[in-house]
Image: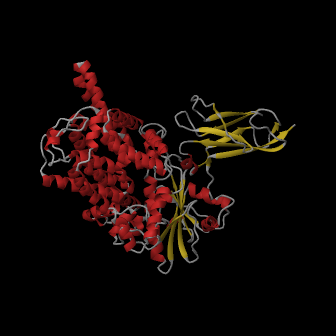
Amino acid sequence: MRRAMEVLDGLGPQESKDVFPNPIDHPYFGQIFLAGALRVSGYPNLLNPSMITNGTTNTSNALHITEMLWLVPRVLIGLLAVADTFLIYKIAERRYNNTTVALIASLLFAVMPLSWMTRRIFLESIQLPLILSSILAAIYLKGPNEIRKNGIHASTQNVNARKQITLVLLSGIFLGLAVFTKVPVFTMIPAVGFLIYTNVTNNTNSITNNKKIDNDSRHRLSSIFRLNAAKMKILGLWFIPVILIPLIWPIYSVSVGYSFDFWLSRVIYQGSRLGQSPLEAALYDDFTFDPVFITIGLAGLIFAAVKREYFLLLWALPFLLFLYEVNWALPFHLVPLFPFFSIAAAVMIVDIANKIGRLKSTIGRLLPFIIISGIAIFGLASTIMLITTNINSSFFEVSAFVAQKLSDDNTNSRNSDVLLLGPHPVWGFFWIPKYVLNENFDFRMVDAQHGFTKNVKNAKVIMISDSRFARTISKDALKQSLANLRTIYLNTNPEATFQIKPFPYNATKYPYINLDASRGYGWWDSKYKIQVRTNTQPPSPSSSQSISTATMTTAAATTKATQVIEKLSDAVKITAPYKGQQVSIGKDFKVSGTSIDNSTSTCSVLVNLNGIKPNQNAVAAGPGGPNDYSKWNAFLNSKYASVKQGNNKINARINCSDVQGLAMHFNVRTSVNVLGVP
């Protein structure tokens, strides 16, 4: 949304380094498309957004307009998801000449809980209809009577040459635009190229048009890859837009002042940046979010391999291999595979149903309808449970409050700079005051990786602090840029504190675990707070305006860090032995403790003595059974490590699939010092 609003404001599709530290991370079509669609709708002026900062506007109206500023683009993305569903239906129907496969595939995509990702404002959501349109155009190169299930098909009629070239070019243009949206989709070139080569009509060879192809897989493979000059020319024509359209990215980037070497270095960095987010972690997260969809999707992949469905294999395997090699895959990065999972699962389900139907004719006739009904009811019920749950109200409240505060500061400080500082979630809404309300301020993202060195002596500062931010600057030893942040923090006053509303359901159970990837601010912890701070004089309660859940507070700017920085809750604790307890040297002993884990989560507890590795696995002792580490015990024997005379340190940490995310809101490590005695 930020980059789309920059395009709407006439700033162009290439973001500046002053706004984002790595402006060359993705091509431009996402922001261009979104900006164009919003411009046609009259956004944002149709919502009268100036009412947010109008002094006569009440709190509820400001909050409502803020929510609507998000809703309109979300509706647009939702319409793209509807188009995706239609395209999946047509692809499956045309490719397999089977309306049952098409109906099941489209239903899986439309109603399964994981598909909510296609309704969010991701580049993948904009990219997906382009990929599907490219595939559909390639499939339509064959007439419907030429299609035979699960194989390479004999041609019985010619497609008009002009129509054929049009479809080839459309397929290439759509795939080129998809790559121009986000680069990893170049891995779809083998799948669509395979369709182009095998589906295009070879008018120069009447023998291949009339010959019935052997069903043996080896003969089918040789027929696919037997090079044909006419087909290769058509394939070359298809490649022209696939290659030329993405080249707009480096050409335009160089034209606005970035060197080609800088562009290339940033692209390489984007594909090889440090960090550990492997493909298997993304698959595990998606499986946790929606085990039914991922299970039948992966089963469909195996089924496609068994049945030698090369189109489906070429769709999935290059993309998965690329993400595996890059080693940076997040759950939403797998969105381009969701249609594949849907179609592959549908093919598998129908094939199995047909085999059962041959054994029992009555069951065979009813089974597809039973399967379709079951999928629709289950998926729709799960999705309704998700979309009717409000978890981001605090996100909108903070956004509206900050917009109002920025407007006040710009009104009262025309001769001073206004600076907004905040952690990563602030990226999600700072575009509203910056580009919708046209407030004059600078934004800097500040966290453990992005410190701050700018001189703020004459600036009006608005700082947004959450648990992650407070944890970062509360450490004893800080590099200079983070030490500067702590100084700024201590010289600001709390203006408003937003209390997160408790989540009404068990967030570790299906389908609500899906919402972990949709959180605004730490919804799982009702103790979590967001604080808006400024370096202006603290307001008096009688003259302050606040959002409904904000509580206005005041504090002296000179309060010590240990007093103003909120202490994070402990995710794990050691209850025995206690601090300073005497422990016999050279003897085995037991360590006990508690954690925030329960029987439905996937955490464990690791313990060590004096930092000696390997860590020892604790044993669950909670009431929920062998996976419940709400209580735990660890037995440290002398073969592992001996208690030495004098001071000894027992360390424990909780180990979860998303321990980095957990560490933003809890202390995931703890320790106790004990005294070794003879």
Q: Residue at x 61, y 67 (%)?
A: 481
- Between 541 and 317, the residue placed more toward the observer is 317
Estimate the x, y position of residue 441 in percent, counting from the top left. 46, 72
**Residue 469 image-quadrant placement:** bottom right
Res 283 visible: yes
State which quadrant residue 44 falls in: bottom left
Residue 116's spot in the image, x, y percent? 36, 46
Residue that protrudes farthest toward the right in the picture: 678
114 over 559 or under it: above or below: above
463 left or right, relative to 671: left
Q: Tell whether 427 sits left or right of 39.
A: right
Q: Nearer the viewer, residue 578 or 16?
A: 16
Number of numbered discs overlaid on the protein picture: 0
Q: Quadrant of the N terminus?
A: bottom left
> In screen coordinates, is 40 left or right of 573?
left
Going by the picture, which residue comes out furthest to the top? 360
Determine the image quadrant of residue 153: top left
Task: Describe the colour scheme in one phrase.
Answer: secondary structure
Decide: is 386 above or below 230: above
Residue 105 appears in the figure = no
Q: Is residue 608 left or right of residue 120?
A: right
Q: Which quarter of the image is occupied by the C terminus?
A: top right
Residue 491 image offset from top left, x and y in percent: 61, 69
Along the line of sight, the residue nearer the viewer: 7 or 630: 7
Residue 345 percent coordinates (x, y) = 33, 35
